[in-house]
Image: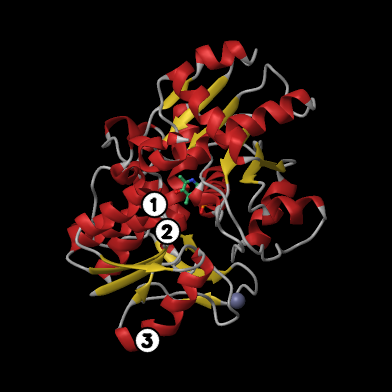
Amino acid sequence: MNVTHLHCSACSKRYEPNQLLNLCECGKPLLVNYDLDAVRITLSKDSLHSRIPSMWRYEEILPLVNKRNRISLGEGFTPLHHARRLGAALEAPNLFIKDESLNPTQSFKARGMTAAVSMAYELGVKKAAVPSAGNAAGALSAYAALAGIEAHIFVPSDTPSANIIECQSLGAHVTLVDGLITDCGKIVAERKEEEGWFDVSTLKEPYRIEGKKTMGYELAEQMDWELPDVVFYPTGGGTGLIGMWKAFDEMEELGWIGSFRPRMVAVQSSGCAPIVEAFHQGMENGTEIRNAHTVASGLRVPKAIGDFIILNILRKSGGTAVAVSDEELVSDARAIGAYEGIFAAPEGGALLSALKKLSSAGKVRHDERIVLFNTGSGIKYLEAFKS
Ligand SMILES: *Cc1c(COP(=O)(O)O)cnc(C)c1O
Ligand SMILES: [Zn+2]
């Protein structure tokens, strides 16, 4: 609502708002800038008390110009659950789970897509396309349906069946691709011009980050403006991690928080861990993983376009990157369920596996305030839990 311009995350080139944008000319993601003095006029910590329990409570710091173009199903403001029983078992009394499975379409992809589809609607888009590992496809299908925008979905043929059935039931055009999300992305890139599709691929569209950054605002608000010590994030494209870091910086500029930052921990599956490899090899960019495989389909991203931003955040925050096996992550998703009553996605389970590893290596202290982002619901991954 108070956007001044967008800028490139790599070369800093500036772009005017109120136009459809994808990547910068240089091929890197764009980030959104706001007039924070204008934001401050109506948005304060106190003003939040009377606002709707959705991520749109932070509307001044979200990109939409006209409220009437908001395409919303009630996303965000998910519970920050104090995981007391699991915490006791791990001797970590300050363990929290931000439960994103309660979002519309059962994953945090709803946050990015409500922002992206609202903006697309405001800017007159009629047809949108996305390559997806599953949950982004479901979210685009839902918000596009609500907006009356045609949704064209490209997913790997071995995507969890719940995601595929969901997209079809939400009226989207679904194409199954014999390959990975990167192959799906290539098809969208090749065909979009001719078909008149707007590409809402993660980070190739600048507003999904804005939607996902609200996780950072909520975390601060729900922790009474004291950020936690460690944040565990299941990293595919890294949109939420980049978004939260951006939110922390915005909140500091708004005077809502100080300069303290959590250590950010990116968690991946050992079957597809480009960020973990690049982090530990001291590389600035990730490599592309061949034969990427994991049941945590949201983590099956062989090459993230914003990998250099993710790696920079992990290092700046004093955090790290951890890979866990599929066996561990499914078993730990079950543990979250059995201790806390939350049927976590495999991606969420991976965070518990990573926490155990870092605790036993002495890299996370027991008394620290730890937050795990359970990014989706296990209900979408029944195949993974059947075995
Ligand atoms: C997409 C997805 C992820 C990865 O999110 P990014 O922000 O792209 O890194 C993690 N978990 C689930 C359940 C997802 O759907
Ligand atoms: Zn650029």
Q: Are marks 1 and 2 in contact (CB under 8 Å)?
A: no
Q: Residue furthest bottom?
A: 194
Q: Mark 3 or mark 2, which has the lower sequence index?
A: 3
Q: Mark 3: which amino acid?
A: Glu
Q: Nearer the viewer, residue 386 or 192?
A: 386
Mark 3 → mark 2, Cα distance in angstroms: 21 Å
Specify whether 268 is left or right of 318: left
The tag on residue 135 is: 1
Residue that numbered label 2 is attached to = 208
Residue that numbered label 3 is attached to = 193
Number of marks: 3
User: Residue at point 51% right, 30% down?
Assistant: 333
Asked if the beta carbon under badge 1 is closer than 8 A to the nearest atom of ligand 1, the reply is yes
Q: Mark 1 or mark 2, which has the lower sequence index?
A: 1
Q: Nearer the viewer, residue 357 or 231?
A: 357
Above or below: residue 253 compared with residue 31: above
User: Residue at point 52% right, 43% down?
Assistant: 251
